């Protein structure tokens, strides 16, 4: 291990399991280590760097904004923040935007908004959240409380009360769970950290219907699926069903901390002055970069390319699945958010890819997740597929 990794071991909180790799530079789909080794990035920093590393146009915007204005607080208006809000509203179902700095904060804002909206419209008995088993919504106490994976709760209970979990895609259970005491249901159109599990059209349609029937809010956590990841600007577009509230983060500023909660006017207007806030939220530098990100990603041709590249990978993976049925159980996902479920522990495959200098993630012990920068090209995709096939062949024999 290198000196820096040793120092990190001493001085950093032990809450991450890190590879002993030190990256010093990034360019497009590539990351370079302190030893000059080059890695092909199929993680995009966990679906964050959708436009790749150090994109020249983003660097340009960042530099210009850095020389101009860094921070004012939200006691004043800044041009990048207003411009980004306007863009997001024009491109989505929403009417107004609240900015924060991370995914979990966007989820917290959505939960607080739902409680307040329900309280002021219907009184204090309408406070319950429905969330899905196997979901992931963040690590602060509120968002953790709606995260449907008990392993993340360990040692942190009691959690925020009033949360009920239902099985994803179980129409019956959802119907039986819903009543007037529910203020909101929160869901990821594709469960990302859960292992890339898409929700069905029927399930989302029924959630929408029940929300309308019982006057509850439909919250989409698009922190991982949003901003072009699935081949549409927002994953809800695949379903043709609009939420009342949506959370964005990860890719919004391509790696700078920025998140957003977007909502319909009649809902978000309950966030009256002083009811919620964030000191850094909507920071001018992050928002300036965010404007450029959204401008580039929302280009229809760019999105078509993402969808096509995703199809190419999925087709290849499905061919591998047929060829190695004892190894690959299922291939799931949309666009460039892809999960490969193996019949075996995925760690050796992940390790072998790493040895071949390809970065991937393993959200579940038997799932390999591919979330490359959306700018990945076909040559790089081919290279990845060949490497993966060699590994599968080796395991089989
Ligand atoms: C990553 C993620 C979060 C949490 O985002 P942070 O920025 O880590 O707080 C919440 N929801 C989903 C769906 C995510 O993928």
Image (cartoon, rainbow, N blue to C red):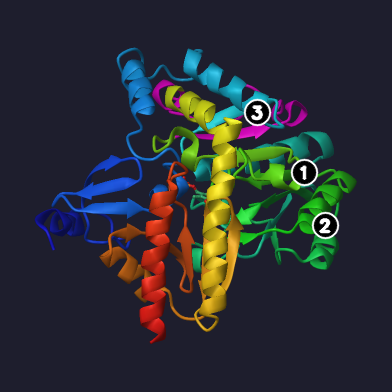
Residue that numbered label 3 is attached to = 91
Q: Is residue 268 magenta?
A: yes
Give me the C-alpha separation between circle 1 and circle 3.
15 Å
- Work out whether residue 389 or residue 60 is closer to the camera in this orientation and state it: 389
Q: Is residue 130 magenta?
A: no
Q: Is mark 1 within 8 Å of ligand 1?
A: no
User: What element does badge 3 sit on?
Assistant: helix
Residue that numbered label 2 is attached to = 178
Residue drawn 61% across and 20% down? 86
Would residue 360 be seen by someone viewing this image from the given angle?
no
Residue that numbered label 1 is attached to = 241
Q: Earlier in the sequence, mark 1 or mark 3?
A: 3
| Residue 285 against residue 359 in the figure, above or below | above
On screen, residue 311 versus residue 3, left or right, reads right
The x and y percentages for residue 90 are 66, 24
Q: Callout 3: 10 Å neighbours few (<14), some, many (20+)?
A: few
Given this view, does label 3 or label 2 mark the residue nearer the observer? 3
- Work out whether residue 216 or residue 4 is closer to the camera in this orientation and state it: 4
């Amino acid at each position: 291990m290198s000196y820096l990794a040793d120092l990190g071991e001493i001085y950093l909180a032990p809450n991450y399991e890190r590879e002993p790799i030190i990256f010093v530079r990034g360019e497009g789909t590539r990351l370079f280590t302190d030893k000059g080794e080059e890695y092909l990035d199929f993680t995009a920093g966990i679906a964050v760097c959708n436009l790749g590393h150090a994109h020249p146009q983003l660097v340009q915007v960042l530099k210009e904004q850095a020389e101009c204005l860094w921070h004012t607080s939200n006691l004043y208006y800044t041009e990048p923040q207003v411009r980004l809000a306007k863009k997001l509203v024009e491109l989505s179902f929403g009417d107004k935007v609240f900015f924060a700095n991370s995914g979990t904060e966007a989820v917290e804002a959505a939960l607080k908004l739902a409680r307040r909206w329900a309280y002021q419209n219907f009184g204090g008995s309408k406070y319950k959240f429905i969330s899905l088993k196997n979901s992931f919504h963040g690590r602060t106490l509120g968002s953790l409380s709606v995260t449907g994976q008990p392993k993340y709760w360990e040692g942190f209970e009691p959690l925020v009360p009033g949360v009920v979990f239902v099985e994803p895609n179980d129409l019956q259970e959802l119907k039986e769970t819903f009543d007037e005491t529910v203020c909101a249901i929160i869901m990821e159109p594709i469960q990302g950290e859960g292992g890339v599990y898409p929700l069905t059209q029927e399930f989302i349609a029924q959630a929408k219907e029940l929300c309308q029937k019982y006057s509850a809010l439909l919250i989409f956590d698009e922190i991982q699926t949003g901003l072009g990841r699935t081949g549409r600007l927002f994953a809800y577009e695949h379903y043709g069903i609009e939420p009342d509230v949506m959370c964005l983060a990860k890719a919004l500023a391509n790696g700078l901390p920025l998140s957003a909660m977007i909502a319909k006017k009649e809902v978000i207007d309950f966030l009256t002055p002083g009811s919620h806030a964030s000191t850094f939220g909507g920071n001018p530098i992050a928002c300036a970069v965010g404007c450029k990100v959204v401008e580039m990603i929302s280009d229809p041709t760019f999105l078509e390319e993402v969808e096509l590249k995703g199809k190419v990978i999925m087709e290849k993976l499905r061919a591998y699945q047929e060829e190695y049925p004892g190894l690959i159980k299922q291939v799931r996902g949309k666009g460039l958010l892809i999960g490969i479920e193996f019949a075996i522990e995925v760690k050796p495959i992940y390790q072998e890819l790493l040895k071949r200098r390809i970065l991937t993630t393993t959200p579940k012990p038997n799932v390999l997740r591919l979330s490359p920068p959306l700018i990945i090209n076909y040559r790089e995709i081919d290279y990845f597929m060949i490497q993966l096939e060699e590994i599968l062949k080796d395991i089989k024999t």
